[in-house]
């Protein structure tokens, strides 16, 4: 399908890139039916890609499939638990047979909840590490091996800034995301010679049902998080997806092994003091008089 030339007719995330810039490309998005995955899938499809969305529950794909039918986008739905390497291999085989070379892989599937480390069960630890760290590796290996054989591609991983800052209550997710960040840089260096770029994005808090219900379930926790963000608001899934599209597009062809932080400044240092009140009034008056 020809992508609409008028950017205002496209989903918000895709408006910053030229129409059709993913034409002829095939993209796989894990967890592609909800939140960031959904907006990214919509953006890729609107810019001309054939998009395969893969997650445990294909019910999550219904809205995207309905929109795709209406807009003549090419979107297919696949059941996949990224913790199962045999399922990942089977999907990679199936997509290669049906769609040919897979150019783009987005490792977006994630699991997370807040739990004190001393109370986290072994099964809970394994669930999150299994989805985030193991799943990202299984998908990268299966699709990456085929990208090597087929002449290259682009992989994008979704991490979080607490991969390097740490964050109380999410030792499972922070440990897994730190591993994914190391994986991003390692595979970028290892696979560059095969024409494969590997990058990551670290979104700050953004409006999303999955994360919202588990991480900021009430107004008080939401407001507390918002106060710590210099730009003073949550982001949107569309804003996050726009940066993902940039990292997957030819606009970033010379970028690999990079992690783009999109968090409104939320991971910057919190102030020890209020610079405005600490600045001497006398001194301010003197300087204002001089200018
Ligand atoms: C404590 C919990 C728990 C909770 C689950 N468990 N939820 N423990 N607190 N809130 C425990 C269960 O008791 C169980 O351990 C183990 O975890 C596995 O749970 P299951 O539900 O049986 O497993 P499964 O069906 O595989 O589900 C995995 C899941 C899932 C991770 C727990 O619920 C999930 O994916 N939820 C949220 C998805 C999400 O939030 N996505 C957005 C991520 S955003 P026991 O010992 O009882 O068997 C993100 C970035 C944030 O990560 C960045 C912010 C800036």
Image (tube, helix red, strand yellow):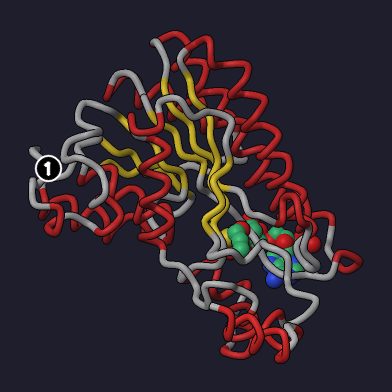
The relative height of residue 128 versus residue 276 in the rendered view (above or below) is: above
Locate residue 273: give its quadrant: bottom right
Locate residue 217: give its quadrant: bottom right
Q: Which residue is mark 1?
A: 3
The relative height of residue 123 versus residue 222 in the rendered view (above or below) is: above
Image quadrant occupied by the N terminus: top left
The relative height of residue 94 versus residue 194 in the rendered view (above or below) is: below
Q: Residue at x 69, y 52 (%)?
A: 128
Q: Position of residue 169 (x, y in %)?
A: 78, 68
Q: Position of residue 186 (x, y in %)?
A: 67, 25
Label 1: element kind = loop
Query: Furthest-front residue in view?
Result: 290
| Quarter of the image where ligand 1 sits | bottom right
Locate residue 151: give its quadrant: top left
Q: Residue at x 58, y 80 (%)?
A: 290
Who is closer to the viewer here, 104 or 79? 104
Who is closer to the viewer here, 95 or 238? 238
Who is closer to the viewer here, 123 or 49? 49
Who is closer to the viewer here, 192 or 227? 227
Q: Position of residue 278 (x, y in %)?
A: 76, 84
Q: Residue at x 68, y 47 (%)?
A: 177
Left or right, 61 with reference to 116? left
Q: Are there few (<14), some (14-19), or many (20+) residues within 10 Å of tag 1?
A: many
Q: Position of residue 33 (x, y in %)?
A: 38, 55
């Amino acid at each position: 399908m020809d992508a609409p030339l008028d950017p205002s007719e496209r989903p918000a995330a895709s408006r910053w890139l030229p129409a059709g810039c993913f034409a002829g490309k095939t993209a796989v998005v894990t967890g592609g039916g909800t939140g960031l995955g959904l907006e990214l899938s919509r953006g890729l499809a609107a810019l001309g890609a054939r998009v395969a969305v893969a997650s445990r529950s294909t019910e999550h794909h219904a809205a995207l499939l309905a929109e795709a039918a209406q807009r003549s986008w090419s979107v297919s739905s696949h059941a996949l638990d990224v913790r199962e390497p045999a399922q990942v291999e089977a999907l990679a085989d199936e997509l290669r047979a049906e769609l040919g070379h897979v150019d783009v892989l987005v490792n977006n599937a994630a699991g997370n909840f807040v739990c004190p480390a001393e109370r986290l069960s072994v099964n809970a630890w394994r669930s999150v590490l299994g989805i985030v760290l193991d799943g990202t590796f299984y998908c990268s290996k299966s699709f990456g091996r085929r990208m090597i054989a087929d002449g290259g591609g682009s992989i994008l991983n979704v991490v979080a800034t607490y991969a390097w800052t740490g964050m109380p209550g999410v030792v499972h997710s922070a440990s897994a995301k730190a591993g994914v960040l190391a994986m991003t840089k390692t595979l970028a260096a290892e696979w560059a010679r095969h024409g494969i770029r590997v990058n990551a994005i670290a979104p700050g808090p953004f409006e999303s049902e999955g994360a919202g219900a588990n991480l900021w379930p009430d107004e008080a926790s939401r407001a507390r998080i918002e106060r710590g963000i210099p730009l003073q608001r949550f982001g949107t899934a569309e804003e996050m997806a726009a940066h993902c599209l940039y990292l997957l597009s030819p606009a970033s062809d010379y970028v690999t092994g990079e992690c783009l932080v999109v968090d409104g400044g939320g991971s910057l240092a919190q102030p020890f003091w209020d610079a405005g009140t600490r600045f001497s009034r006398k001194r301010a008056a003197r300087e204002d008089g001089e200018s």
